[in-house]
Image (spheres, rainbow, N blue to C red):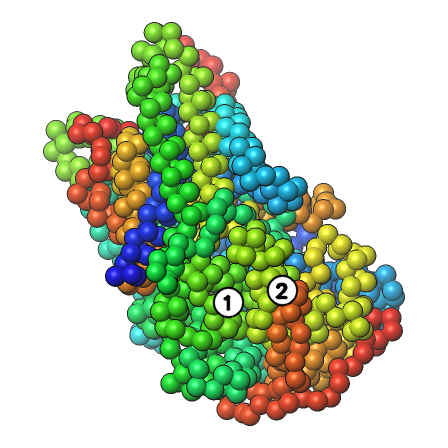
């Protein structure tokens, strides 16, 4: 029986979907234990990590697997957040959970549609030109909210108000509930992206990334593949944006500065391009590094206010640069090297 | 293929567990998020710990980052002189770089991990708005928000939140009434920040200045430092008076661009953007070119503004003497300007509230102490605190910049932010206590 | 009409600033195929040095400017050798992250040295009061003219350097084909460092010029950050391989933004930049002045 499931020819090996679903369920279980076991403060850090994972998963798919650059993924998060807020304004039901799922799905769809437009434009661009366009997108799109003639609809500088969904009555407090929502969404997004990655679609991404000409000779429409990559990664970022809106209780331009997009990029590169595990490591690092560097600064008890105010930033900048120099393939690259190193030690005979 | 998903799962779990383990001290899992069980977290027999979120770095740090340092200096002074009811005050202010997502994270840290007794002087409207619900749900006193938004006065929805400074609409009304009286029939134009600060101010101005007199309304966005177009449009409107609800950087930018095109109307600036020392500093390098004799302050002479605290350059004022002494001892490297005075004055008000909360302060007790009413301290006008109003200063006083100071004229006036009338307030400002510490 | 004239002049002077930033980005791109995201931070840092000399220690404007440019040269050279050399041949995104790390580091360092509590004003080189035309004043001053002329002079000097000198030829060869250049005995590494140094020096000049305008201040995080994005947009519009494109792109962007700010709305400036960029790239995906062969990166 166990053989049927776990062996090399067993069910798990053959069905990617089953494997991923199982992993997702295990992940959910572990997260549930984690959320219940951790204190309030740690819980409040879990939510930002979780929605960063959503966006980073999409971005690593786009950048790592389909080989396109997006320096402005924050823009897709913004579209997701505003879609969430706008639809919530006009549609409330009494079924809290249903509404939540509907709104997050809407955020994903809204961002995906926008991603389609961007993808079509992006399909013509390469390398630094795509980088420049997405950078301008990240900077320019949020300012649309402050455009005078749209302030009524888009809320101007203050943004649109968002109502946080309430937990099933009495079970846990609203902040833990936000963590739960974010974590479940992250697991779902990861599950989805993992399946895409292992599917024909994912293979087409990698084919186009590695050699456009060969890919088109095989019958793939390069442009369509590239647009699809943008659509999927934008949808993930849209979910992340919706989650951000829930936590911030607003969808406003100030929550989407350039540093958000750069942070996502850092998470993806740091974790290891194209790797979902990397997206998780990278998100944890990008969210927690400022906290750790603040704690480090506090521990050092620096006398000068100028120095102590800026030390967390300095640590962040130094770590980013040094990490890239030391581990060009990101954390996942290091893990892989360690993994194969251990394997070589443990099973020397296989190497001959 | 199997190995990669296992790796993913294993890796993520490992990392998360490490993270959780690093949490270490984190307290009891599950249960309600409110800390109302402990009525006085952050209070020990000898200390009181309070927290704040401030823009210490980032684009708006200039000016604003002085406020927390000044408040901290005042608290240090109190601590060195016996504290309040035998307790010293520890002030933990964290950097949010004016990014609301950061404000949310830092505030949660202050409440759930650092377990501060109260939040004091959280700075900024778009930033603090995001944490007001959280603080009130957790029954944390949210005292003296550093922003003139009218939204902090909402007793029913936010019973733990209190404003402090004169709100922008009250200020706009008083400025507007002064202009209506002083410049009857003249053309007036507005230059204002494109958010609630500018818009609330303009609302107040419009309550007093007749619509027919307003010939131009030019907004600006803090992300765009090129205001040459607004200056040109203001000039084209031929306004005699320009009222500016702007932060100091943009007040200076406006002045420079008006000088550039040879436009010299009477300039009226909100208290937020009119600190003479800050403005002189910002205009310093342009002064000689603009025909000033020596320094930047020449370019700001005659600017009409307002203030609800005494002018920092008035050495005969007992509060200024106190603050100057504290400044010279604890923060001598900062200029003694309006921001520093603001920080110390707000800290004084907090000390008043803490003293009034008694020898065993609780969170609810602190809130009640403020609602019972606080003496105006270094303010020129009284506070509005009561059980039905959580707004701060009730008005302001018109002044004119002469030299590097604001010379206050006439008497302070008070009003509300709707249709109430404007009343002069003639009671003299109380003098500072001899030791500089309120007695509650 | 007067308004249009003013807007055009404003667009030209702002455009020349963008052009200069674009030019330094193009120089780095041509040499090392990297976009220097730290450009804004580097020029902020060198401007702080200039400010410290000029306003705090009362050093002469021109001396401070020279020192700023020299510091820029040093900063660029050091950045290339220490940070960029190791990632030059790797995945391009690694270089992006490294330069981002450098940007944050420089902002933090400036804050540590000079503090975040004040925004500082910087003197203009010449009068900032607009020229008198009849009984009105243009929104264009001697200082604006100085900026336009200074950037033009630098552009011409760089053009002559690259096209007419042996050094310039060697630099172009190293950028075009490093392997062959090495075979010919060219010290490619040294020239790459020189390229970064020059780009940073140019950036330093831009920083000092911008700080002295009626829309610039010196502070660790502030107006200089948007400069990178506008400069990059201008460079992309013009085509990243073309210095002439950088200048034209800068001017075009400056003019269009100036008109749009005034005739449409002034609080969505970054949105206009985005629209101009999209419009140009849709017609010519590699910029206005790109060579016909599409370069695969």
Secondary structure state at the residue bearing disc 2: helix
The numbered mark at residue B276 is 2
Horizontal and vertical percent position of residue A26: 44, 47
Q: Residue furthest front?
A: C134
Residue under the point 61% across and 79% down: B398
Secondary structure state at the residue bearing disc 1: loop
Horizontal and vertical percent position of residue B116: 69, 63
How many numbered discs?
Answer: 2
In the foreground, B434 or A223:
B434
Q: Quadrant of the C terminus of chain B?
A: bottom right
Residue under the point 57% across and 71% down: B303
Q: Image quarter for residue B88?
A: bottom right
Could you tell whether A80 is left or right of B253 in the image? left
Residue under the point 35% across and 69% down: B236
Could you tell whether C150 is left or right of B94 in the image? left
The numbered mark at residue B246 is 1
Q: Image quarter for residue B163?
A: bottom right
In the foreground, B209 or C59:
C59
Q: Earlier in the sequence, mark 2 or mark 1?
A: 1
Please say whether residue A190 is visible from this viewpoint. no
Residues under numbered marks 2 and 1 in contact, where contact means CB atoms less than 8 Å apart: no
State whether discs 2 and 1 lie on one chain.
Answer: yes
Q: Which chain does tag 1 point to? A: B
Could you tell whether A38 is left or right of A279 in the image? right
Mark 2 → mark 1, Cα distance in angstroms: 14 Å
Q: Which of pointers 2 and 1 indicates the residue nearer the eye?
A: 2
Mark 1 crowdedness (10 Å alpha carbons): few <14, some 14-19, many ≥20: many
The numbered mark at residue A284 is none
Residue under the point 30% across and 47% down: C253
Horizontal and vertical percent position of residue C165: 35, 17
Q: Quadrant of the N terminus of chain B?
A: top left
């Amino acid at each position: 029986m166990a053989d049927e499931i776990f062996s090399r020819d067993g069910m798990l090996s053959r069905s990617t979907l089953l494997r991923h679903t199982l992993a997702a369920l295990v992940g959910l279980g572990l997260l549930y234990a984690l959320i219940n076991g951790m204190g309030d403060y740690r819980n409040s850090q879990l939510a930002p990590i979780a929605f960063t994972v959503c966006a980073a998963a999409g971005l690593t798919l786009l950048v790592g697997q389909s080989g396109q650059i997006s320096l402005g993924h924050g823009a897709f998060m913004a579209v997701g957040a505003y879609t969430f807020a706008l639809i919530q304004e006009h549609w409330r039901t009494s079924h809290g959970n249903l509404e939540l799922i509907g709104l997050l799905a809407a955020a994903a769809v809204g961002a995906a549609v926008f991603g389609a437009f961007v993808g079509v434009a992006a399909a013509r661009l390469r390398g630094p030109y795509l980088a420049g366009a997405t950078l301008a997108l990240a900077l320019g799109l949020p300012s649309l909210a402050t455009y005078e003639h749209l302030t009524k609809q888009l809320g101007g500088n203050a943004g649109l108000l968002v109502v946080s969904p309430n937990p099933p009555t009495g079970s846990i407090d609203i902040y833990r509930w936000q963590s739960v929502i974010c974590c479940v969404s992250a697991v779902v997004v990861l599950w989805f992206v993992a399946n895409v990655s292992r599917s024909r679609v994912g293979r087409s991404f990698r084919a186009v990334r590695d050699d456009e000409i060969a890919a088109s000779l095989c019958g793939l429409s390069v442009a369509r593949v590239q647009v699809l990559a943008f659509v999927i990664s934008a949808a993930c970022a849209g979910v992340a944006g919706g989650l951000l809106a829930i936590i911030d209780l607003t969808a406003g331009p100030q929550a989407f500065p350039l540093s958000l997009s750069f942070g996502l990029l850092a998470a993806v590169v740091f974790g290891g391009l194209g790797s979902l595990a990397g997206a998780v490591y990278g998100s944890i690092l990008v969210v927690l590094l400022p906290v750790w560097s603040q704690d480090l600064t506090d521990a050092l008890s620096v006398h000068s206010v100028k120095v102590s105010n800026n030390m967390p930033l300095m640590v962040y900048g130094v770590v980013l640069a040094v990490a890239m120099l030391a581990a060009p393939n990101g954390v996942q690259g290091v893990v892989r090297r360690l993994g194969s190193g251990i394997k070589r030690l443990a099973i020397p005979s296989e190497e001959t | 293929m199997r190995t990669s998903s296992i790796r993913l799962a294993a890796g993520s779990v490992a990392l998360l567990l490490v993270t959780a383990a690093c949490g270490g001290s984190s307290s009891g899992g599950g249960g309600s998020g409110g800390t109302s069980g402990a009525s006085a977290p952050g209070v020990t027999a000898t200390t009181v710990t309070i927290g704040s979120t401030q823009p210490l770095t980032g684009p708006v740090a200039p000016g604003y980052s002085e406020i927390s340092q000044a408040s901290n200096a005042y608290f240090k002074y109190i601590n060195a002189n016996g504290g309040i009811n035998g307790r010293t005050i520890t002030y933990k202010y964290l950097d949010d770089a004016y990014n609301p997502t950061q404000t949310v994270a830092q505030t949660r840290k202050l409440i759930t991990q650092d377990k501060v007794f109260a939040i004091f002087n959280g700075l900024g409207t778009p930033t603090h708005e995001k944490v007001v619900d959280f603080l009130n749900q957790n029954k944390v006193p949210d005292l003296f928000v550093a922003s003139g938004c009218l939204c902090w006065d909402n007793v029913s929805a936010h019973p733990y939140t209190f404003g402090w400074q004169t709100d922008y609409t009250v200020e706009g009304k008083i400025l507007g009434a002064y202009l209506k009286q002083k410049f009857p029939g003249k053309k007036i134009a507005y230059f204002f920040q494109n958010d609630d600060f500018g818009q609330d101010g303009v609302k107040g101005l419009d309550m007093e200045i007749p619509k027919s007199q307003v010939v131009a309304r030019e907004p600006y966005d803090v992300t765009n430092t090129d205001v040459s177009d607004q200056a040109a449009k203001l000039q084209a409107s031929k306004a005699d008076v320009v009222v500016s609800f702007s932060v100091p950087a943009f007040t200076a930018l406006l002045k420079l661009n008006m000088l550039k095109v040879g436009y010299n109307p009477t300039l009226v600036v909100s208290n937020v953007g009119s600190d003479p020392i800050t403005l002189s500093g910002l205009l310093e390098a342009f002064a000689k070119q603009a025909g000033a004799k020596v320094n930047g302050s020449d370019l700001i002479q005659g600017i009409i503004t307002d203030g609800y605290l005494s002018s920092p350059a008035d050495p005969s004022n007992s509060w200024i003497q106190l603050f100057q002494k504290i400044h010279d001892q604890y923060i001598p490297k900062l200029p003694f300007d309006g921001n520093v005075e603001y920080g110390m004055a707000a800290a004084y008000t907090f000390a008043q509230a803490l003293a009034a909360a008694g020898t065993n302060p609780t969170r609810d007790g602190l809130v009640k102490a403020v609602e019972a009413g606080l003496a105006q301290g270094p303010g020129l006008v009284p506070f509005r605190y009561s059980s039905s109003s959580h707004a701060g200063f009730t008005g302001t006083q018109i002044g004119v910049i002469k030299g590097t100071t604001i010379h206050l004229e006439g008497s302070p006036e008070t009003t509300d932010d709707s249709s109430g009338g404007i009343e002069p307030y003639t009671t003299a400002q109380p003098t500072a206590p001899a030791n500089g510490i309120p007695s509650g | 009409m007067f308004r249009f004239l003013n807007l055009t002049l404003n667009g030209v002077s702002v455009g020349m600033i963008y052009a200069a930033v674009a030019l330094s980005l193009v120089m780095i791109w041509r040499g090392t195929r990297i976009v220097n995201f730290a450009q804004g931070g580097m020029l902020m840092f060198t401007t702080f040095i200039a400010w410290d000399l000029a306003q705090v220690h009362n050093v002469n404007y021109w001396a401070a400017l020279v020192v700023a440019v020299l510091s820029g040269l040093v900063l660029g050279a050091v950045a290339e050798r220490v940070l960029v050399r190791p990632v030059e041949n790797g995945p391009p995104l690694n270089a992006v992250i490294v330069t981002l790390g450098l940007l944050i580091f420089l902002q933090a360092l400036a804050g540590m040295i000079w503090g975040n509590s004040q925004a500082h004003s910087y003197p203009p080189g010449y009068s900032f009061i607009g020229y008198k035309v009849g009984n009105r004043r243009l929104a264009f001053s001697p200082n604006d003219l100085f900026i336009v002329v200074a950037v033009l002079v630098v552009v011409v000097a760089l053009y002559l350097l690259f096209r007419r000198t042996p050094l310039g030829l060697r630099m172009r060869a190293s950028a075009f084909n490093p392997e062959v250049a090495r075979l010919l005995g060219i010290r490619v590494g040294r020239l790459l460092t020189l390229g970064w140094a020059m780009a940073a020096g140019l950036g330093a000049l831009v920083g000092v010029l911008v700080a002295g305008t009626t829309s610039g201040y010196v502070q660790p995080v502030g107006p200089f950050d948007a400069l990178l994005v506008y400069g990059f947009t201008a460079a992309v519009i013009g085509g990243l391989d073309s210095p002439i494109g950088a200048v034209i792109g800068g001017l075009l962007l400056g003019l269009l933004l100036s008109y749009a700010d005034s005739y449409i709305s002034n609080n969505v400036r970054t949105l206009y930049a985005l629209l101009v960029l999209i419009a140009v790239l849709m017609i010519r995906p590699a910029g206005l002045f790109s060579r016909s062969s599409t370069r695969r990166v």
